Amino acid sequence: ARTDSGSADRADALAFPAPKSAKCPFDPPPAVDRARAAHPVVRATLWDGTSAWLITEHEHVRQVLGDKRFSAEGTRDGFPYLVAGVRELVRTMKPTFFRQDDPEHARLRRMLTADFMVKRVEAMRPEIQQLTDELLDRMIENGPEADLVADFALPLPSVVICLLLGVPYEDHRFFQERAAALFSLQATAEEVRRSQQELLTYLAGIAERKQREPDGSIISRLVAQGELDFDEIASTGRLLLVAGHETTANMIALSALVLMRNPDQLARLRAEPALVKGAVEELLRYLTIVHNGIPRVAAEDVAVGGVTVRAGEGVLCLVNTANRDERVFPGGDTLDLGRDANRHVAFGFGVHQCLGQPLARAELQIALETLFRRLPGLRPAIPFEDVPFRHDQAIYGLGALPVTW
Ligand code: HEM
């Protein structure tokens, strides 16, 4: 086994992110697949010439994400970034718990765990169902053509997270545009900085309003509790607002597309609606929209998969390749809605594992079941080759999905 930590200019380092195949854009990049066939821990060169280790197997991804010696602090040297200037930028801003280690991470996350528990989310199902039906009513009224992203996949989770946080949905254009800039791999550091700042100012304004006019929302409760200052409330609100809609929206759109491409699987789901829970887990596994790795940096030397990751070196945990690991998911390159996909790591693993996963699951289950029940003839209105995949975003997805029925 290799035990060297390599260097940035190693000839065999893989340029990352690598392009996906045009033929199957749902699969991890072929270059990553080739490299991981040779060794499960892959040396990669990032856009700025710095290097990081790609952790590609299920076992090692769980090892790294479960090990406190790997830090989630984005301000540390060696933390891998896929966009220029962001490391310098985060050093000037208050971090959210997403990019902090315990105990600070746990202190802030604990304030929100009750809001996203399964029990609380289950109680929201009737409301999510109603919102889903209203969006479909409008689509049908204006049909028989629509953009499934703009008219369905994006508004549904956006409205839901707005209701939870106490943010007016009328402002959706403002926050959706800024959220998209935060996820773009093409954005400049200045664009990222401006989007962050505008979102923070906006959410601080909402927090101030809740102080005068309290309601049942999360932001209002955080203000009333008084444990967090206004800056912390604004940055927590920004994290939830951004994470709460972009991710689920892309999962809804990609899932709808991949189901339309697999009519036998779709027929199975239609015939047996109780399959929807397992089907959503399989779609989460197969599509894994966090497609460029979950970043960490080693705080000490740690051995992973026969490689010593040195203190200060970055790693990217490739949950998309881990979710195709043949030893855990035999035949994993095939979508199989009947598979037991519960061990997938699409929501991460360890202490940072997705806080919103019960909500994302409920939204996906309701959205997909209702969409294909109410529009049995749903099909793409453009050739597959013309579907705009968002390769240049941190979260994989579709720019638009023209459909008809
Ligand atoms: C964390 C994926 C939906 C809020 C994460 C992480 C992943 C992930 C992989 C771990 C990041 C890391 O370890 O660094 C997803 C996917 C979603 C989704 C695939 C949809 C299908 C949501 C929703 C919300 C949300 C709907 C909120 C309402 C969060 C938060 C964290 C997080 C707050 C940070 C948790 C922490 O650091 O302790 N998500 N997410 N996510 N997610 Fe999600």
Image (tube, rainbow, N blue to C red):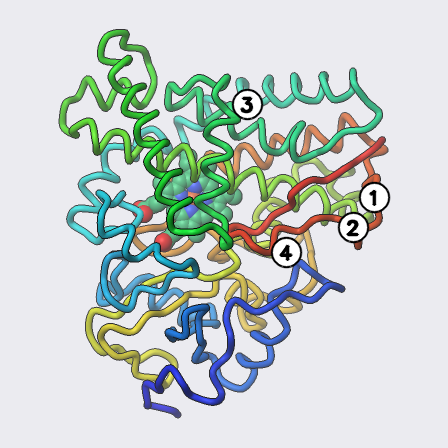
Who comes first in sequence, dot 2 or dot 4?
4
Q: Nearer the viewer, residue 287 or 178?
A: 178
Against 271, residue 305 (above or below) is below
Who comes first in sequence, dot 4 or dot 3?
3
Q: Is residue 88 left or right of residue 295?
A: left
Amino acid under disc 3: Ile
Where residue 23 sits: x, y (%)? 76, 64
User: Which residue is pictured at 23% across the width and 33% down the height?
Assistant: 111
Residue that label 4 marks:
339
Task: Find the distance from the CA under tag 4 to the CA under tag 1.
Answer: 30 Å
Residue that label 1 marks:
382
Who comes first in sequence, dot 4 or dot 1?
4
User: Which residue is pictured at 44% across the width and 28% down the height?
Assistant: 121
Q: Is residue 234 visible?
A: yes
Q: Quadrant of ligand 1?
A: top left
Q: Is residue 358 visible?
A: no
